[in-house]
Image (spheres, rainbow, N blue to C red):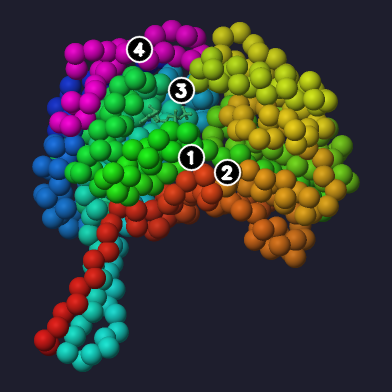
Amino acid sequence: PISLLKDPSLFKTDALINGQWVAGTARFDVNDPATGRKLADVANLGAKDAETAIAAANAAWPAWRSKTGKERHAILMKWYQLLMANQEDLGRIMTAEQGKPFAEAKGEVAYGASFVEWFAEEAKRVNGETLAQFDNNRRLMVIKQPIGVCAAITPWNFPLAMITRKVAPALAAGCPVVIKPAELTPLTALAVAELAVRAGIPAGVLNVLTADSSNSIAVGKVFCASDVVRHISFTGSTEVGRILMAQSAPSVKKLSLELGGNAPFIVFDDADIDSAVEGAMASKYRNAGQTCVCANRIYVQDGVYDQFVAKFAAKVKLLKVGNGFEDGVAQGPLIEDAAVEKVQRHVADAIAKGGRLQVGGHKLQGQFFEPTVISEATGDMLCAKEETFGPFAPVFRFKAEQEAIDAANNTEFGLASYFYSRDIGRIYRVAEALEYGMVGINAGVIATEHVPFGGVKQSGLGREGSSHGMEEYVEMKYLCLGDI
Ligand code: ADP
């Protein structure tokens, strides 16, 4: 697939520090999850390189900060245009290293680029405030300034969008960034960085440190301990989020964390069932179930339960599984063997505890797993408590509205939730009762660049996207001007 790139120079395997491509002294392998074949050797950088990148970012900061918002807007818009002009190639690199179907990968390129476009616009709107004065001799105001050097640690499930969602607001606000992409998907990150260089983002303003899993831990420690790094944005597991938070305590660092989810998807008796089935398909099986907002637990009210399960299972049966480059494939491989094993464990546990297999249920060759639906799921199953992060949909039965709300909220997570109903009173009641940062009402896919994405409880801190996404990267400063 890589040989099919229109622009082979997007296929970068070295890291980017201070505008220089750095080969490093060690390399690590990046493999295609669909075939198991090696795609590339990538620079394996460590703690010392992280120090160098942070210093380069800090040195680049004054010039970047002193550009006007409109100047940064122009550079970011160029980057946006280059991302879109290279959508095919970026999608190809992404499918090769991540596995998602090519159409979905191209969709992610557009989604990821949309953050660059959005925050390019927001760069012009970092407005302060003038406050009422209590004393005629004084004038009070608030200005907003870039927070400083930012670090971003990103996951493999959205190799492009999770980078732009953090980097675009940081750059727009006037902050330089050091990125540590996931070790499983560094090639997309490097291609995106190459386009940033072509767009005219100055040396040192955007740095990419590629590292294998053990060096990623070392780099993370350097980010957390650094007094120069003022902000860390992380998307990944709750477990690693907790580690970063603990490691950041000594330097009292600002953190934006987008962690695990365990999304409930509730279908009430009064729902439009066909629409609910469509929503569940999109929410559950996108990216083979490997997104933090994927429906993890589907709760269906007694009166429509059998109808929903029959229609849902019939649609799931039609999903084509295979290499993401094949036509018509709706579900690619899972990212690694451990991911396949987790799905297997959840499915076996659900069956052992009385779940009824409606479709799928089996591991296929390599890292592929059948799209699976199990009905009569119950609260004692693993899938009720843990995020499966794979193509397995357990369907639970409930009777009363409150029962569904209680079950939905019975988790330490609080990222995305979904429910289907046509009753306006119920819509407000349930939307307000769900302890989640995001609620899809009669909608299974809700993320877009101009809404605040993020969670409550142990799903994280802060919001990404929208005008609120910019707030993470600026500090307010109160000015009190006396003796007027
Ligand atoms: P996932 O469960 O989605 O693989 P992880 O939380 O393990 O998510 O990884 C997300 C990102 O965090 C990756 O870039 C990974 O390299 C990085 N990472 C994992 N462990 C640490 C750590 N201890 N310190 C810093 N980064 C880490």
The 10 Å Cα crowd at callout 2, few under 14, some 14 to 19, many 20 or more, is: many
* Residue drawn 26% across the image and 86% down it: 133
* Residue drawn 75% across the image and 36% down it: 379
Q: Is residue 18 visible?
A: yes
For the residues bearing labels 4 and 2, Cβ distance under 8 angstroms: no
The amino acid beneath tag 4 is: Asp
For the residues bearing labels 3 and 4, Cβ distance under 8 angstroms: no
Circle 2 residue: 413
Circle 3 residue: 98
Give the mark toward the camera: 1 or 4. 1
Residue 50 among those drawn in magenta: yes
Q: Is residue 176 visible?
A: no
The 10 Å Cα crowd at callout 4, few under 14, some 14 to 19, many 20 or more, is: some
Q: Earlier in the sequence, mark 3 or mark 2?
A: 3
Residue at the outermost bottom position? 136
* Residue drawn 62% across the image and 29% down it: 388
- Rounded to the nearest angstrom, the CA distance separating label 3 from label 2 is 26 Å
- Rounded to the nearest angstrom, the CA distance separating label 3 from label 1 is 20 Å
Image position of 361 with respect to 80: above or below: above
Give the mark toward the camera: 3 or 4. 4
For the residues bearing labels 2 and 1, Cβ distance under 8 angstroms: yes
